[in-house]
Amino acid sequence: MNMIARFLKKKSHLSELVDQFGGLSREEAVQAATQNLEDMRAESDQAIVWAIGQLETLVMGAAERSDAELTKQVLPLCDRIVTLAGTFGYAALDKAARSLCDLLDDLSSQGKSDPASVRVHVQTMRMFAPGATPLGEQRTAVLLFELHKLLEFHGLAPPERSEDFSAAAAP
């Protein structure tokens, strides 16, 4: 019993940390995380603009590559844009990049090509890029609706109304 008493009296480093008062409240931690995210926004915006530039270069030189090769190069860039746009609240850009991913995935699985639809997606993404002139909610909704119509043409999306896209227009 003497051994047990000594064992129980010994405090571990973890128990000492738990017993200490302090730390951040949940609200403070959320504020700190939000501030950290905002501190990364400029770098993220540069990465998005760079990725869109790479997409433009790839799409404009598409005749030099096979469809499979183009898709293999474009999808990682789209994925990067989707991740950053979603993280930093660029809803319209996120939706346009996801639309391009869906289009490329479908075209690839069917062995088809539609360079014009891919180009339209990339050009639309440029208009939604950080630093671009804001288009306003109505114009953004129209552009997203047009991208949806391209997916609908390829059988990838059910028919919807342009009003359904107004929520994605908000930054």
Image (spheres, grey):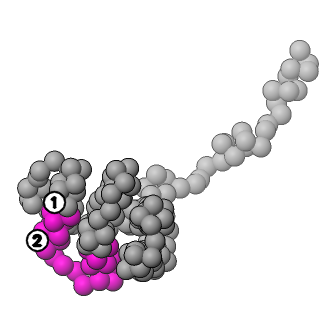
Is label 1 in a helix, a strand or a loop? Answer: helix
Q: In the rendered structure, which amino acid carries the disc numbered 2? A: Gln
Tell me which corner region of the image, top left, top right, bottom left or bottom right, holds residue 151. bottom left
Q: What residue lies at 18% left-to-right and 54% top-to-bottom?
A: 152
* Span of residues in magenta: 121-148
Magenta-drawn stretch contains 123: yes
Which residue is label 2 attached to? 138
Q: In the rendered structure, which amino acid carries the disc numbered 1? A: Lys
* Horizontal arrangement in the rendering, residue 171 relative to residue 145 (left or right): right
Magenta-drawn stretch contains 25: no
Indicate which disc residue 149 carries. Answer: 1
Report if the CB atoms under discs 1 and 2 are less than 8 Å apart. Answer: no
Using a 10 Å C-alpha cutoff, classify the residue at mark 2 as few (fewer than 14 neighbours), some (14 to 19) or many (20 or more).
some
Q: What residue lies at 16% left-to-right and 76% top-to-bottom?
A: 136
Q: Nearer the viewer, residue 54 or 154?
A: 154
Q: Is residue 136 above or below residue 151?
A: below
Is label 2 in a helix, a strand or a loop? Answer: helix
- Image quarter of the C terminus: bottom left
Q: What residue lies at 33% left-to-right and 83% top-to-bottom?
A: 131
- Chain-order first, disc 1 or disc 2: 2
Using a 10 Å C-alpha cutoff, classify the residue at mark 1 as few (fewer than 14 neighbours), some (14 to 19) or many (20 or more).
some
- CA gap between label 1 and label 2 equals 16 Å
Magenta span: predominant SS is helix
Residue 79 position within the rendered picture, expressed as x and y whole percent measured from the top left = 44, 61
Q: Nearer the viewer, residue 7 or 142?
A: 142
